[in-house]
Amino acid sequence: MTASDLQHELEVAVALARRAGAAIMEYYREGVDVDYKPGDEPVTVADRTADGIISSGLRSAFPGDGLLTEESEDDATRLQKERVWIVDPLDGTTEFLEETDDFVVQIALTMRGRPVLGVVYQPVEDRLYYARQGYGAYQEYRALRTRLHVSAETRPEGMCLVASRSRYSDLIEAGRRALGVQTVQRVGSVGLKVGLLAQGACDLYLGTNVCKEWDLCAPHALLLEAGGELTDLHGEPILYNKPEVGECAGLVASNGLVHAQILEKLAPLVERLPR
């Protein structure tokens, strides 16, 4: 099966994202208990319920595919699979707990380590982003379906930088100054940040080494189909379904028009970061 044959996969992923989002909303603003995973990452019954819905749905629909999801034990058999689903059932658990509305469900499909399909669903707003390789990126919101495309801004100093609401690091601030960016928008989930880039509302996203594969894969697919570019801070491509699902070496997501120029301006700040 080629990436151009993924309409059925997209329909399944969208349906599961909506079901998981509805389940999450049953717990939202209800004062759920919080557990903590290694690294002090919060996890709730909402995360686990959404994970169960998506994982069981994908395994039933596509039993021959691999699966990597944040809230389930990793199964190394995925490494032998050409097609692997990568899932974050609730991206933005901190924002879910803080009741900011900036959380999403994320479902992606990779082929040979490359993102070819992505679904990002914000249940509070009933906002759906989706893309499949070769067919563009779209938003469904308030009964409107819109094809997405990144902005045409080519001046780094004229760009709007979208950055983390809770993890605005010294490196990101130094990068903003190095690029001369004046406008910053702070948002929670990675999916929502990249969604702003995909629809041309912002132009640039800088992230440090906090993103894991499930945080990034679905937004990555969306941005590529909207015409943007995403690399690590060294300009290297980001691949998925790796044996060790560690933190990425930071990331730069942009409208793609002056991506190399942005990386060049950031290089003095990141030369000591691990590769």
Image: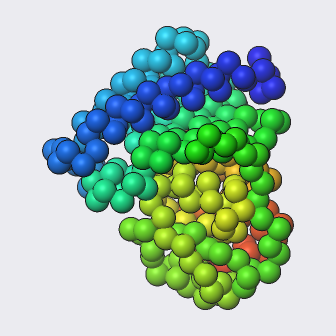
Q: Position of residue 95 (x, y in %)?
A: 35, 57
The quadrant where residue 232 appears: bottom right
Quadrant where the C terminus lies?
bottom right
Q: Quadrant where the N terminus lies?
A: top right
On screen, residue 238 versus residue 126, left or right, reads right
What residue is rendered at 29% in x and 35% in y? 26
Front position in the image: 109 or 148: 148
Q: Residue at x 72, y 62 (%)?
A: 200
In depth, the one of 234 and 93 nearer the eye is 93
Residue 37 visible to an observer of this rendering: no
> Going by the image, does 52 lie left or right of 270?
left
Is 8 left, or right, of 241 in this rendering?
right
Task: Examine the image and state in which quarter residue 162 appears.
Answer: bottom right
Q: Is residue 1 above or below residue 72?
A: above
38 vs 29, nearest the viewer = 29
In the rendered image, residue 16, in percent from the top left (x then y), is placed at: 49, 26
Q: Quadrant of residue 100?
A: bottom left
Q: Is residue 185 visible?
A: yes
Depth check, front residue: 239 or 30? 30
Looking at the image, residue 189 sits to the left or right of residue 272; the answer is left
What residue do we see at 34% from left, 39% from top? 25
Residue 106, how many percent across, how many down? 51, 40
Residue found 54% across the figure and 73% down from its top: 185
- What colouring style does the render use? rainbow
